[in-house]
Image: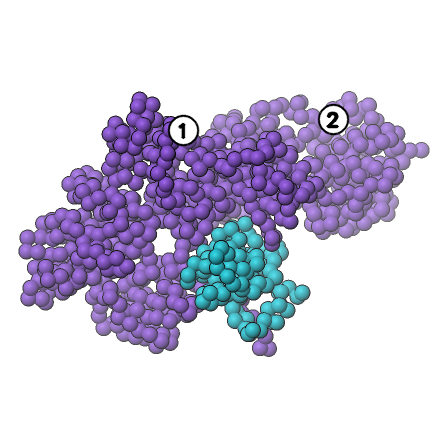
Chain colours: A cyan, B purple
């Protein structure tokens, strides 16, 4: 792994998200109420809604377009919905958010 | 000849080390003990009870003169060690040099002082040792105001002690809730509530800018320019290892003095123990690991093999009446699950954090009886999968039943108001039930509770059920969401009567089953709280749907639409030019005229929003709130200005109404219209509130809609003047804000409470109308403002990506 610093934890509000642009599209970086961070592909498996704009609750986010609930840990759609988005390694160290550069660069259109 | 052991620092760690050493080998060393304080070892943890007056210094002494004499310890208290000469193996003090064969550094920690102006003023003290404690006790004798900076363990203990001694105490805490390192938000809320109950004021998110005063401290100034008066300031923001001696002696020091598992420093004859050490990246501030270190060091000194390992830690607060426990890790990792238990009646909150069938963290408030058991499970990494269902109930409870959904209502005190319309408290309803009113209609007949607007019906039924037990069956009601068994109406009523003014307060007091709600309840709670407590509650953007958080409507491709306000549908060439310029500058693909008589710019990129707003603001255009559960538009016709049929100035009234109502949040969207004559060109009879002008005045109708349901308004009243029309519209809007269920349009609210009740409240009863208008105006003093201007000015960065890795990759 090769961790890169993409910003401070406090740049994201608790129970909120911000977007990181990559060559292959946007990654949504979430911060939960308990200050965990998660990085997911910023496109709901349903109709590609921008997950970073959703309401974060517990360790899940609700897509702003049609209320699909996506697990931040697994990327899986919850309840009766079926689908999954890619997840990326993310962690917090010393108040900074780190993402794995290799995994981000390895993203493909597929 | 015996080897010489010199110990620098006579605190709890070195004290315990000596005890262990003498136990293992009473005569191994000639011991010389230096201490900067003019006294021997005492139980520093018990300084808080000394401060509060529950204990005296004598009661917390661990080693008295007799103990030191018995063990032949040469005590040199009050004599500061100024240097260590490792080459010659001596320590240096003002009195000269003292040789050692083995040296133990136990210098502990020093309080962290915030580097602000005024930090050295008389009256500013830290909280670390007996002298500090005595200084506080002396200061408290004069009474007055104390400010404690730091809402951690030590700061809160200091605050409680000073309060106990009769001072007015304010705690300033930088973070969002007190003891954030040990407690989560919910437990932090309960602790704060208990502290405030005993008269301690707690200010969170309070960042100290300066300490004020001429000859001595007079107050504290916060970053946001709020001043807090103070005769005494206690700084309790944290501690750092005291490493100066070790540093100067050239030992390896990171944040603390680096030691190996045998407590040996980089010099094989020098050891360190206690808060001054760093081991494997860890620092230590609690007593349990210090005692472990002391034991290991004693064994090392007598040549026995021993190794220190870092163990799980737990915390308890030593403030009488605040029962809290925190252990392990309750944040920061993948694959974790929560079990949450809340008992509002007893003010109890328990949360266990599970990972791989083990408990990794626990927070408890109000009932910590089982904390040792849980702590054992954490420490031993026990597999809890077998008892998971009843785990939260503790060791003595197996096969427990689920939490009682009526616990919150059962917990209400008799003076809790249930029916707001008629001012009926729980006690009166219980009394009526006990006197034979055993169903809803009987209670209604006797007490009038739930007899007016009816939104408290669910609560009255729950009081019946709680009082009558199995003899009463509650009709099934739709709970708000999976996080609670209560209905919207129940929750709303209790927010008001129990004065719940924050999201964590609601979650705890009403027994939420999740740690922080969900996308269904959070937006509703946010609305209820801001509508009921406009001055106290801070709007939470993270609990709002994206449109209201970003003040624009999200489109299916993730872009946004931007709709500036056109008051009453009136615009001018300058505004139109600004809109045209913005549309070109930001490559807006679609420009559309809306049904609400204004212009929609569709397809704006999220990151461009603050910039297009700033441009529109320059032309005087503000947010049209086309995205809000709040006032949308006031549609008008041209009225007497131009129309040959117009009876009144409908455009003018529409603009006035829009200027009064804009920015207000309502349970669902709120659309108005004013038509200048009964021909009704503004389509006022299918709006939430519609005014139709007639020769003799203004007809006000409510409850129209033209969406999924099509409804015609019903006539609320006819009034003579424009002023009265505006007043009635404000009053009905406020009544809807106060009583409407989140996501009910006015017609749905009207179906529940009845047009007669609304008419009585906002038309006939002039006192009630005036009070509603006043409450509306109070709320508008906060919310009648342009969010676009605010975001463009202060929050533009949150609209931009956090990072852009495409540039890097291109290189």
Q: Quarter of the image containing the N terminus of chain B?
A: top right
Q: Where, by quadrant of the figure, is residue B542 drawn?
A: bottom left
Q: Please name the residue shown 61% across and 46% down the image.
A: B354
User: How far from the left and from the top, in percent, is residue B142?
Assistant: 50, 27
Number of the front mark, 1 or 2 = 1
- Relative to B578, say whether B142 is above or below: above
Q: Earlier in the sequence, mark 1 or mark 2?
A: 2
Q: Chain of mark 2?
A: B
Q: Between residue B430 and residue B701, name the one nearer to us.
A: B430
User: How far from the left and from the top, in percent, is residue B244?
Assistant: 72, 46
Q: Where, by quadrant of the figure, is residue B675 drawn?
A: bottom left
To the question of a shared chain for discs 1 and 2, the answer is yes
Q: Residues within 10 Å of mark 1 (few under 14, many from 20)?
A: few
Left or right: B743 as drawn, with respect to B142: left
Q: Please name the residue shown 86% across and 29% down the image.
A: B26
Q: Is there a contact, CB below 8 Å, between mark 1 and mark 2?
A: no
Q: Is residue B101 visible?
A: yes
Identify the residue position indicated by label 1 in the image. Answer: B469
Q: Quarter of the image containing the C terminus of chain B?
A: bottom right
Q: Please name the residue shown 30% across and 65% down the image.
A: B564
Identify the residue position indicated by label 2 in the image. Answer: B63
Q: Considering the numbered disc 2 on the image, is that residue within a helix, a strand or a loop? A: loop
- Relative to A3, say whether B251 is above or below: above
Q: Please name the residue shown 30% across and 34% down the image.
A: B419
Number of marks = 2
Q: Considering the numbered disc 1 on the image, is that residue within a helix, a strand or a loop? A: helix
Q: Is residue B201 visible?
A: no
Q: Chain of mark 1?
A: B
């Amino acid at each position: 792994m090769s961790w890169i610093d993409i910003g401070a934890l406090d740049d994201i509000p608790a129970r909120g998200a911000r977007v990181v642009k990559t060559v292959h599209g946007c990654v949504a970086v979430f911060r939960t109420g308990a200050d965990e961070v998660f990085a997911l592909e910023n496109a709901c498996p349903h109709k590609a809604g921008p997950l970073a704009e959703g309401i974060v609750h517990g360790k899940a986010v609700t897509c702003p377009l049609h209320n699909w609930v996506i697990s931040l840990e697994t990327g899986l759609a919850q309840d009766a919905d079926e689908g999954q988005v890619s997840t990326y390694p993310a962690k917090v160290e010393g108040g900074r958010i780190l993402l794995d550069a290799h995994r981000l660069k390895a993203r493909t259109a597929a | 000849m015996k080897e010489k052991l010199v110990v620098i620092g006579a605190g709890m760690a070195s004290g315990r080390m000596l005890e262990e050493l003498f136990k293992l080998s009473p005569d191994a060393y000639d011991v010389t003990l230096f201490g900067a304080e003019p006294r021997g070892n005492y139980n520093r943890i018990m300084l808080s009870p000394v401060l509060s007056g529950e204990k005296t210094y004598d009661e917390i002494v661990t080693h008295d003169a007799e103990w030191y004499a018995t063990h032949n310890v040469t005590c040199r208290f009050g004599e500061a060690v100024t240097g260590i000469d490792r080459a010659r193996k001596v320590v240096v003090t003002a009195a000269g040099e003292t040789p050692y064969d083995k040296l133990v550094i136990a210098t502990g920690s020093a309080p962290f002082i915030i580097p602000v102006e005024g930090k050295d003023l008389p009256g500013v003290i830290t909280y670390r040792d007996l002298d500090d404690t005595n200084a506080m006790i002396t200061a408290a004798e004069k009474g007055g105001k104390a400010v404690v900076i730091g809402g951690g363990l030590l700061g809160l203990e200091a605050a409680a002690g000073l309060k106990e001694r009769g001072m007015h105490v304010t705690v300033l805490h930088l973070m969002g809730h007190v003891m954030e390192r040990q407690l989560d938000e919910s437990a932090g809320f309960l602790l704060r509530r208990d502290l405030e109950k005993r008269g301690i004021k707690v200010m969170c998110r309070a960042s100290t800018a300066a300490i004020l005063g001429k000859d001595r401290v007079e107050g504290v100034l916060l970053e946001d320019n709020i001043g807090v008066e103070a005769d005494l300031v206690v700084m309790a923001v944290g501690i750092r290892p005291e490493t100066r001696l070790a540093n100067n002696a050239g030992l390896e020091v990171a944040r603390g003095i680096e030691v190996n598992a045998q407590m040996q420093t980089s010099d094989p004859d020098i050891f360190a123990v206690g808060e001054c050490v760093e081991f494997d990246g860890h620092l230590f501030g609690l007593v349990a690991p210090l005692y472990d270190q002391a034991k290991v060091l004693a064994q090392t000194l007598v040549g026995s093999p021993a190794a220190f390992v870092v163990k799980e830690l737990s915390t308890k607060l030593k403030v009488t009446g605040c029962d809290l426990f925190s252990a392990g890790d309750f944040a920061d990792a993948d694959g974790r699950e929560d079990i949450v238990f809340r008992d509002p009646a007893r003010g109890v909150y328990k949360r266990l954090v599970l990972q791989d069938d083990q408990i990794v963290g626990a927070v408890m408030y109000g009932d910590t009886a089982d904390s040792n058991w849980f702590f054992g499970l954490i420490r031993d990494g026990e597999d809890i999968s077998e008892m998971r269902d009843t785990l939260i109930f503790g060791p003595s409870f197996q096969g427990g039943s689920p939490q009682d959904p009526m616990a919150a209502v059962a917990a209400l005190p008799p003076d809790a108001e249930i029916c707001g319309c008629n001012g009926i408290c729980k006690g009166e309803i219980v009394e009526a039930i006990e006197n034979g009113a055993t169903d809803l209609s009987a209670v209604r007949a006797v007490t009038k509770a739930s007899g007016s607007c009816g939104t408290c019906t669910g609560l009255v039924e729950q009081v019946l059920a709680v009082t009558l037990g199995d003899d009463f069956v509650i009709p099934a009601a739709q709970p708000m969401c999976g996080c609670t068994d209560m209905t919207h109406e129940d929750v709303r009523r209790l927010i008001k009567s129990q004065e719940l003014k924050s999201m964590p307060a609601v979650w705890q007091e009403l027994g939420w089953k999740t740690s922080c709600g969900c996308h269904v309840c959070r937006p509703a709670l946010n609305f209820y709280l801001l509508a009921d407590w406009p001055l106290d509650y801070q709007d939470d953007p993270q609990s709002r749907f994206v449109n209201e958080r970003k003040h624009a409507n999200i489109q299916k491709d993730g872009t946004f639409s931007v709709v500036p306000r056109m008051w009453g549908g009136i615009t001018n060439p300058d505004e139109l030019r600004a809109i045209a310029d913005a549309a070109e500058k930001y490559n807006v693909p679609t420009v559309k005229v809306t049904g609400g008589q204004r212009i929609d710019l569709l397809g704006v990129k999220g990151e461009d929003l603050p910039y297009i707003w700033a441009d529109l603001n320059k032309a005087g255009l503000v947010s049209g709130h086309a995205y809000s559960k709040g006032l949308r538009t006031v549609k008008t016709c041209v009225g007497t200005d131009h129309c040959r049929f117009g009876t009144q100035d409908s455009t003018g009234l529409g603009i006035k109404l829009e200027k009064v109502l804009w920015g207000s949040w309502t349970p669902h969207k709120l659309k108005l219209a004013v038509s200048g004559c009964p021909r009704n060109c503004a389509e006022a009879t299918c709006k939430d509130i519609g005014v139709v002008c007639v020769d003799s005045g203004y007809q006000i109708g409510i409850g129209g809609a033209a969406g999924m349901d099509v409804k015609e308004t019903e006539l609320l009243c006819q009034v003579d003047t424009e002023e009265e029309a505006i007043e009635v519209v404000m009053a009905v809007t406020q009544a809807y804000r106060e009583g409407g269920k989140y996501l009910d349009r006015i017609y749905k609210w009207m179906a529940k409470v009845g047009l007669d009740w609304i008419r009585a409240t906002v038309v006939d009863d002039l006192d009630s109308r005036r009070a509603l208008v006043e409450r509306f105006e109070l709320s508008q003093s906060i919310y009648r403002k342009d969010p676009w201007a605010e975001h463009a000015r202060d929050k533009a960065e949150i609209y931009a990506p956090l990072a852009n890795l495409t540039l890097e990759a291109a290189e």
